[in-house]
Amino acid sequence: MPTPDLPIGKSSKLSIRYLTFDRKNPRYSEDREVAVDSDRDVIEFLLSRADLKELIDSIAHSGYIDIEPLIVTRTKDLYTVLEGNRRFAAIRLLREPDLAESCKVQTPPLADGVAETLDELTVYAVNDRADAQDFIGFKHINGPHRWDSIAKARYAATWYHRERNIEGGMSLQEIARRMGDRHDTLKRMVLGINVLDQAKASRIFQVEDRYPERPFAFSHLYTALTRKEYRNFLGLPDEWRDVDPEPNPIPQDKIENLKKIMLWLYGSADDDVRPVVTSQNPHIKWLAKVIEKPKALAILNANSDLKIAYGEVNTAAVQFEHALIDAQQKAQSTLSKINAYNGNDHALLEVAVELEGTSNIILRNMEVARKSFVEQAGNDAGSEE
């Protein structure tokens, strides 16, 4: 039987025999150490990463609720499922016992009447991926079925790079608006994907070479790239919000620095090197402070210990500076609310008295230290003469 020609832009019923998985689904991105060359590969991936068993049980007991159509596009003699691969996989397993057995899935028996709901599915046909991207992007970026960060980034970057080749194509800001992003998240992610692609193309980093048994924390990279310390280290413009990300953003003379950043963030299995960043907070900030201080950076390069290197930056003097500024800001904030105190709580007044005493002690000690510093500076100047 020839493949039916479905009307574009409309919903239709289609036999499941004419459907095939989308091998370019953003779920199958760089952090996935899997191949998706066959239907079995796709299904095994979804079984391990997309809660497929729960969906199988639901359909087996209640039937397929054919409300939201699969989004499909014609590919030769079949229709590729651009949106709905998880539902399609569950139905395939329930319909094909041999496939389920090869995937080591024990499917539950179908309740009465369920089998008839799995023969024909409602699909919505589009000309190509571009026609489906608004809906798919919103659903998986900020909608009810969100992808992980690298799948979101790859989807947005592919869309954006396609638009760049079209005269009058959409800006990344417009794409982000269509996908429901209002906080520059997609811009950060696309920048991260561009840098990751450049690192891979330069053969200084491969995702599969990250330190063993650690997930690929893509957010480490795109978060770091928005901090001025990393941007200066990598030769990027100071302000990332001002321009849309371009491919290969790292200058060639900074590629070795990029190699160091990737090693610090993700480590290397081949070289048995652990990453120095093991949690985004506070290690991304610590590393930022280290790379802008030559001595601290030298310590990190020598022993690969971020805590020791950060100790060179986070000295007692720096801690005192931060604590004093923080105390002053909190005192200013408290002062702005002084009218809320009506005098009925004597204990609060005692707290204020203690605060005054502590402030006076801090001030007197700082004045003594300042006087000593000025005198010493004067003596040093006199000895030079």
Image (cartoon, rainbow, N blue to C red):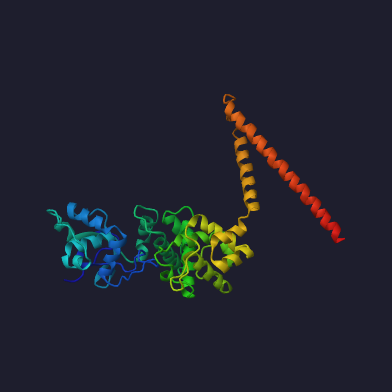
Q: Is residue 323 something one can see in this rendering? A: yes
* Residue at the farthest top position: 344
* Of the pair 21 and 321, the residue shown nearer to us: 321
Tally the marks.
Answer: 0
* Of the pair 160 and 208, the residue shown nearer to us: 208
Q: Is residue 80 something one can see in this rendering? A: no
Quarter assignment of residue 94: bottom left
In the image, is residue 306 above or below residue 75? above
Looking at the image, residue 205 sits to the left or right of residue 1; the answer is right
Image coordinates for residue 74, horizontal then vertical, percent: 28, 68
* Residue at the farthest right position: 385
Looking at the image, residue 175 sits to the left or right of residue 57; the answer is right
Image point (27%, 54%), residue name:
68
Image point (50%, 59%), residue name:
223
> If the image is split into quadrants, where does the C terminus sit?
bottom right
Image point (75%, 45%), residue name:
368
Quarter assignment of residue 7: bottom left
Image coordinates for residue 201, horizontal then vertical, percent: 47, 74
Image coordinates for residue 227, horizontal then vertical, percent: 56, 59
In the image, is residue 349 above or below residue 168? above
Image coordinates for residue 204, horizontal then vertical, percent: 49, 74
> If the image is split into quadrants, where does the N terminus sit?
bottom left
Looking at the image, residue 116 sits to the left or right of residue 132; the answer is left
Looking at the image, residue 225 sits to the left or right of residue 108; the answer is right
Quarter assignment of residue 6: bottom left
